[in-house]
Image (cartoon, grey):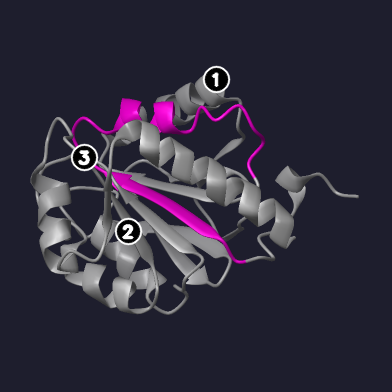
Amino acid sequence: MESSNNMLNKANYKFIIVGSAGSPNVAVNLLKINEKLNIPVIICIHFTSSAMETFANHIEIETGHIVKIVDQPTPIKNEIYLPKGGKDIIFISENTLNSVESEYKVHPSISKLFESLVKYADDKTTIIVLGGLGDDGKDYAKILRNKGVKFVIEKNPRFPYLPNNIAKELEMRYEQAEQSRIKDIIIRINRQALQDY
């Protein structure tokens, strides 16, 4: 039998982590789950273009998970995905990612990712919103929630502006959680996905 990491995302789980300032280290710590991934994880955190590859290497070393930088159409497996530096990461089909040139001042753009996700989102999609500045992604938050997407907002982040702006759009229909609780959510979904294969 093919290992879970090599399996395509046939169960259609999507686990997405978004954020901005103060979020990279939090994302890394959340993914230290001491289990193989049974779900694809897409990370969309505002980052300096030249540092994206270093960030990807850091995640791989710290978590032990396979990390891929997306720069062409990429079918998603049970791995972690980041866009190439300076680009936006988007869904181009149910289970395929790509990177496109960013039209935004901050990148990768959460709004661009969310916009691309609208067509493919459902109740097997979970979005974790970590700390950061600005309001990137808020315009699509309610649309995604109405399609069944579960939002988990980091409680007491270092920079509360981004999660607060997205939370306002969700009108209390989200879970607010400490980092330890978010890690528990990741583990629960990771184990549930294995049962669904």
Q: Which residue occupies the foreground of this view, 88 or 114? A: 114
Residue displayed at 46% across by 66% down: 91
Q: Quadrant of residue 182?
A: top left
Residue depth check, mark 2 versus mark 1: number of the one nearer the observer: 2
Reading the image, the residue beneath label 2 is 151
Looking at the image, tell me whether mark 3 or mark 1 is earlier in sequence order.
1
Question: Which of the numbered marks, if any, corresponds to residue 61?
Answer: 1
| Above/below status of 145 relative to 197 | below
Question: Which of the numbered marks, if any, corresponds to residue 155?
Answer: 3
| Residue 149 rendering spot, x and y as whole percentages | 39, 68
Classify mark 3: helix, strand or loop: loop
Residue displayed at 38% across by 71% down: 116
Residue depth check, mark 3 versus mark 1: number of the one nearer the observer: 3
Write the start and end of the magenta stretch as one range.
12-37
Disc 1 crowd, CA 10 A, few/some/many (<14, 14-19, 20+): few
Disc 3 crowd, CA 10 A, few/some/many (<14, 14-19, 20+): some
Three-letter code, disc 1: Ile
Contact? badges 3 and 1 (CB < 8 Å): no
Between the C-alphas of marks 2 and 3, the distance is 12 Å
